[in-house]
Image: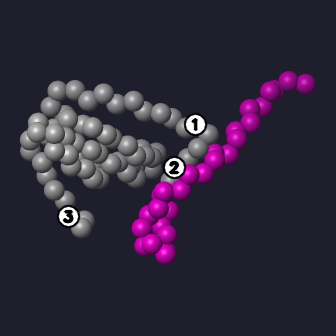
Amino acid sequence: GNEIRQFHERYEITSLVGTICADGQHHLHMGLGDKRGVGVGGHLLEATIFTTCEIVLGECSDLEFVRKHDGRTKFDELMIVRRRSRRMSSGGA
């Protein structure tokens, strides 16, 4: 279901993937493993890092990630669109 669960143990982050959008509509999925190796995962809403968390972000400067409401699914669905080219004026002859 869509229940929100909180975890208060210390976990290892095994995966963190998703989109970080300029409009603030982030959508991240996180996988965690406990000290016994048992895994859990789902949408990341918020987290507190105990020691460190190494994150590498990649930017797709020619693409824009936006969410638009889909009347069929009733959800804001991810759409990836190519950014419009911004031509620079040369200012010369």
Residue type at tag 1:
Ser
Sequence order check: which comes first, mark 2 or mark 3? Answer: 3
Q: Which mark is residue 61?
A: 1
Q: In the image, what residue occupies the spot 35% across and 48% down?
A: 28
Q: Label 3: few (<14), some or many (≥20) within 10 Å?
A: few
Residue 88 vertical position relative to residue 31 in the rendered view, above or below: above
Q: Label 2: few (<14), some or many (≥20) within 10 Å?
A: some
Give the residue at the far left of this rendering. Answer: 9
Residue 34 coordinates in the image, percent (x, y): 14, 40
Q: In the image, what residue occupies the spot 20% across and 46% down?
A: 39
Mark yes or no: residue 47 visible.
no
Give the residue at the far right of this rendering. Answer: 93
| Helix, strand or loop under label 1 | loop
Residue 84 coordinates in the image, percent (x, y): 68, 45
The residue at which mark 3 appears reads as 3
Residue 19 drawn in magenta: no
Residue 7 vertical position relative to residue 57 in the rendered view, above or below: below
